Amino acid sequence: MKTPTKSSYHHGDLQKALVNTARLMLEKDGIASLKLRAITRNAGVSATAAAPHFGNLTGLLSALAAQGFDELSEAMSPEHAREPRDVGLAYVRFAIANPGLFTLMFRSDAIDPDHPALATASARAFARLAALPASDQSGISPEAAMASLWAKVHGLAVLAIDGLLAPLIRHSNAPLTIDQLVEEAFR
Amino acid sequence: MKTPTKSSYHHGDLQKALVNTARLMLEKDGIASLKLRAITRNAGVSATAAAPHFGNLTGLLSALAAQGFDELSEAMSPEHAREPRDVGLAYVRFAIANPGLFTLMFRSDAIDPDHPALATASARAFARLAALPASDQSGISPEAAMASLWAKVHGLAVLAIDGLLAPLIRHSNAPLTIDQLVEEAFR
DNA sequence: AGACGTAAATTTACACTGTAAAAATAACTT
DNA sequence: AAGTTATTTTTACAGTGTAAATTTACGTCT
């Protein structure tokens, strides 16, 4: 048995070390820089050192994406986000604060949605969204209201990351922020 | 000078042939299958035959993305989409009908946003969105109204492509379609 | 304590990838 | 018809992911 608090691998805790270096590379140089050889090189280990832990590159990136969903769930948790509005704000703010990671979390050709840790982590995050009380203004179903909210918030996140919202905000006569756009979705 | 209507290359019209095969591969096997060597192989030419036309793989994919934006503009044009609602429907329907292409159009690490053809094509499509009359229900600025609409429609498109909307629609008691979700955004 | 079994990491090897440079081919122009 | 240019191929090289065999170090057990 290995002590859970302390490291017990040859390297220290290569599992976490690889995910951490991958994350640093991700936010620094973008998703395209996430090559397995580059990650292991930056972590100071051989090219195939990740295989016993993650299988292949997809496994490593899935673990990183799972960590992203965990942090997103945390940011959207009832402690940090009381009102529905706060959940939306947390969603978009997380995306803008971690553009590379957020993008990776939805890049289904780079990760494996069936990866155990990722599947449970994403399910938990989505469940938090589904728990949003449907502000049934019109006579639409709760599912429709929830899908609409999610779509709007997700769209704002994605467009903001791609830099496509900035020109609109800039050319607006009235002062405009992304937070305002999010709040508007919850009215 | 080469005649514009007829082909005048060695191969026929390699430029278009390469984009066409790339598009077929894209919708058949996904973005991950868009390797330069595989594309040229499927087109029946040597591995480096694309270089004189597109420079590198990014150039080829940018040309393909530009074609996508052209078709999207066409689908959203005043002839095909009269009311604002129709523009949103055209947007989402195009995305769902061409999931690979639509995804590529917004994958900024695989294409070059400054690529001439792509830049003009995307600008034209976005201009069509910007021309949407702001249905100023509340006292929000036209830019805010436009950004909100775009975000919601784009979010629906992206989530639908990723298969994340299907479970919601399935578990809805009241019958629910993506079209309905789009229409709801325009009210 | 010392030997064993096992997990972790490295070395080696191979089939791919993108693309630069040089050579060859076909087309157009004059 | 000859020469110039544009298009395509051949060749070459650095880099990628990962499977297989080997080495290394750890934990365990008598």
Image (cartoon, coloured by chain):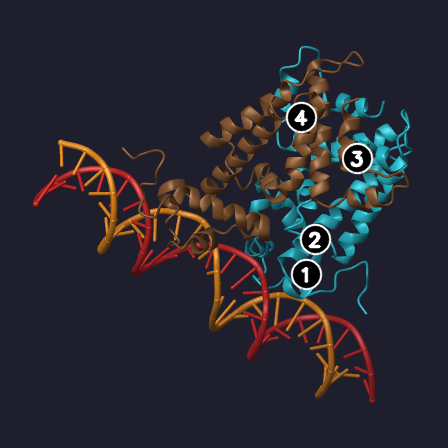
Chain colours: A cyan, B brown, C orange, D red
Q: Secondary structure at mark 2?
A: helix
Residue position for label 1: A54
Q: Chain of mark 4?
A: B
Mark toward the start of the polypeptide (2 vs 3): 2
Is circle 1 on the same chain as circle 3?
yes
Residue position for label 2: A62
Distance, label 2 to label 3, CA atoms, is: 22 Å
Mark 4 or 1: the one toward you: 4
Is circle 4 on the same chain as circle 2?
no
Q: Chain of mark 2?
A: A
Residue at x 77% of width, y 45% of height: A69
Between A122 and B19, the one nearer to me in the picture? B19
| Residue type for callout 4 | Val
Residue at x 70% of width, y 60% of height: A12
| Residue type for callout 3 | Trp
Q: Chain of mark 1?
A: A
Q: Secondary structure at mark 4?
A: helix
Q: Secondary structure at mark 3?
A: helix
- In-image side of B186 versus B3 (left or right): right
| Residue type for callout 1 | Phe
Tell me residue B136's x, y (percent): 76, 13
Q: Quadrant of residue A43?
A: bottom right
Q: Secondary structure at mark 1?
A: helix
| Residue type for callout 2 | Ser
Q: Rate crowding at label 4 as few (under 14), some (14 to 19) or many (20 or more) other CA atoms within 10 Å.
A: many
Q: Rate crowding at label 1 as few (under 14), some (14 to 19) or many (20 or more) other CA atoms within 10 Å.
A: some
Distance, label 3 to label 4, CA atoms, is: 21 Å
Residue position for label 3: A150
Q: Are marks 2 and 1 in contact (CB under 8 Å)?
A: yes
Which disc, if any, is residue B87?
4
Mark 3 or 4: the one toward you: 4
Q: Quadrant of residue A100?
A: top right
